[in-house]
């Protein structure tokens, strides 16, 4: 299987993308496992980072980009392969930083992980700026 990006390899389906809430689902497969039929902890982190970054992108001013500055994950329980659900909410939307908290659950609603991340906001240029501004403006997903 060939992917254009790591985000594609995560199999994320966006449910809601707004300035105040990001919600998505991810279908995990053997590629996302730790080799024992359980979702690898790094997948929780990557899924949450993608959602928190998307929230930050939705709040970017013109001419700015975002990048993760810090991330902390509390692993609460393991998950067998299948669907993960993530919801990311802003804790702080500032001029130079944003803080987002993502809760990852299984389809039964049991919490699997809670991730807090800080996104820095900075002037951008080139392909990164073009892509993030296009995502913010709904031109691409």
Image (tube, rainbow, N blue to C red):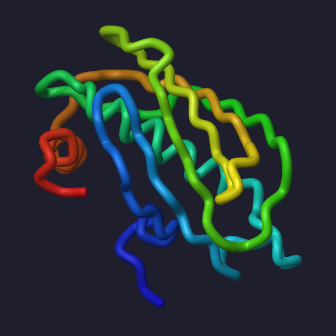
Please tell me which residue is depicted at 48% across the width and 70% down the height of the picture: 11
What percent of the width, then of the height, locates residue 39? Answer: 75, 65
Q: Residue furthest top?
A: 95
Please tell me which residue is depicted at 52% across the width and 40% down the height of the picture: 87
Q: Which quadrant: the C terminus?
A: bottom left
Q: Residue furthest front?
A: 108
Q: Quadrant of residue 73?
A: top right
Please tell me which residue is depicted at 48% across the width and 90% down the height of the picture: 1
What percent of the width, then of the height, locates residue 86? Answer: 55, 47
Q: Is residue 134 left or right of residue 80?
A: left
Q: Quadrant of residue 96?
A: top left
Residue 73 vs residue 18, the one in the foreground: 18
Q: Is residue 116 above or below residue 112?
A: above
Q: Is residue 42 above or below residue 69?
A: below
Q: Is residue 9 above or below residue 24?
A: below
Please tell me which residue is depicted at 70% across the width and 56% down the height of the picture: 108
Residue 67 vs residue 80, the one in the foreground: 80
What percent of the width, then of the height, locates residue 28? Answer: 62, 71
Q: Is residue 19 left or right of residue 106?
A: left
What percent of the width, then of the height, locates residue 22? Answer: 41, 40
Q: Residue furthest bottom?
A: 1
């Amino acid at each position: 299987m060939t992917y254009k990006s790591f985000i594609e390899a995560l199999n994320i389906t966006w449910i809601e993308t707004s300035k105040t809430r990001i919600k998505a689902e991810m279908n995990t497969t053997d590629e996302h496992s730790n080799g024992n039929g359980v979702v690898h902890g790094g997948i929780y982190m990557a899924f949450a980072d993608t959602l928190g970054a998307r929230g930050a992108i939705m709040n970017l001013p013109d001419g700015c980009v975002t990048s993760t500055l810090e991330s902390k994950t509390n692993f609460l329980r393991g998950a067998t392969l299948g669907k993960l659900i993530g919801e990311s909410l802003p804790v702080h939307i500032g001029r130079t930083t944003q803080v987002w908290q993502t809760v990852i659950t299984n389809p039964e609603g049991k919490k699997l992980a809670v991730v807090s991340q800080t996104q820095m906001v900075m002037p951008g240029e080139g392909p990164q700026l073009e892509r993030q501004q296009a995502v913010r403006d709904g031109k691409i997903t």
